[in-house]
């Protein structure tokens, strides 16, 4: 069974440019999460989808971040325009239900804004 | 609000030594879930264990063991006879009952030297 897949694995962009990160969850997982780890700090929650609906987007830092999950399958996270402080590793995770089991994480996308 | 503290930023040991990674959590909920994840150099977060708040039994899995103590709000992780392959960043995380998101600690980098 394929795990959570994230693309790209690395991205280096200039300040002001746009970047789109993609996450393919494990098939059948309704819950999809985006997290971010800024260098040296904890991994922080960004938002949570249940199928195609945003269940909780309280962790989104500002309106430069836009997440979508078309048809309840894969998800994209767009940063537009990117700022230096957006640099970090963006993780995607999926789960059936955390109360019943674990969240499975992808390998992350390392974003560097220069 | 929930919080997870991993006070040890980095630990260095020599192969075959035992090592304990500390995790202290804060939550107002009586129902919650605790997790440990491992992040090897390849970048992905690998699930190690999930424990619910009503199960204080310690768990052992091979060289890994976990000590959950509600009285001290701690969920410590011990690796016995450490190996070089154990070198990674280890994250402790908390999920409060009724919610599916994870609150992570800052992680502890473990370096095991031959």
Image: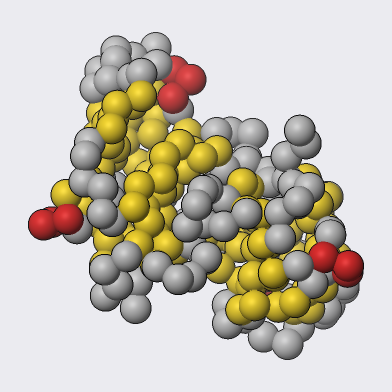
Residue B22 percent across, percent down from the top left: 25, 45
Q: Residue furthest left?
A: B71
Task: Please name the residue shown 47% across and 43% down the image.
Answer: B37
- The relative height of residue A82 versus residue B113 in the rendered view (above or below) is below
Colouring scheme applied when the structure was drawn: secondary structure
For the C terminus of chain A, the quadrant is: bottom right
Residue A2 percent across, percent down from the top left: 78, 36
Task: Please name the residue shown 57% across and 43% down the image.
Answer: B45
Residue A99 percent across, percent down from the top left: 47, 57
Could one spot residue A83 in this view of the protein? yes
Left or right of A14 in this view: A53: left
How many circles with numbers are drawn on the protein? 0
- The relative height of residue B62 versus residue B40 in the rendered view (above or below) is above
Task: Please name the residue shown 34% across and 78% down the image.
Answer: B1
Left or right of A107 in this view: B67: left
Residue A15 percent across, percent down from the top left: 80, 73
Quarter occupied by residue A55: bottom right
Could one spot residue B13 in this view of the protein? no
- The relative height of residue B30 versus residue A96 in the rendered view (above or below) is below
């Amino acid at each position: 069974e394929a795990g959570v897949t994230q693309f790209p694995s690395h991205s280096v962009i200039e300040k002001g440019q746009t970047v789109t990160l993609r996450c393919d969850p494990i098939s059948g997982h309704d819950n999809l999460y985006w997290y971010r780890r800024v260098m040296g700090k904890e991994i922080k929650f960004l938002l949570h989808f249940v199928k195609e609906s945003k269940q909780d987007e309280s962790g989104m830092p500002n309106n430069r971040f836009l997440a979508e999950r078309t048809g309840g399958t894969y998800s994209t996270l767009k940063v537009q325009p990117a700022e230096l402080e957006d640099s970090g590793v963006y993780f995607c995770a999926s789960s059936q239900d955390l109360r019943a089991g674990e969240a499975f994480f992808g390998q992350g996308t390392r974003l560097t804004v220069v | 609000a929930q919080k997870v503290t991993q006070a040890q930023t980095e630990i260095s040991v020599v192969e075959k030594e035992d090592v304990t990674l500390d995790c202290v959590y804060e939550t107002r909920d009586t129902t919650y879930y605790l997790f440990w994840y491992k992040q090897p150099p390849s970048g992905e977060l690998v699930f190690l264990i999930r424990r619910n708040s009503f199960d204080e039994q310690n768990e052992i899995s091979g060289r890994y063991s976990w000590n959950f103590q509600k009285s001290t709000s701690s969920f410590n992780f011990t690796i016995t006879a450490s190996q070089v392959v154990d070198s990674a960043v280890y994250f402790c995380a908390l999920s409060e009952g009724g919610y599916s998101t994870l609150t992570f600690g800052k992680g502890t980098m473990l370096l095991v030297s031959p």
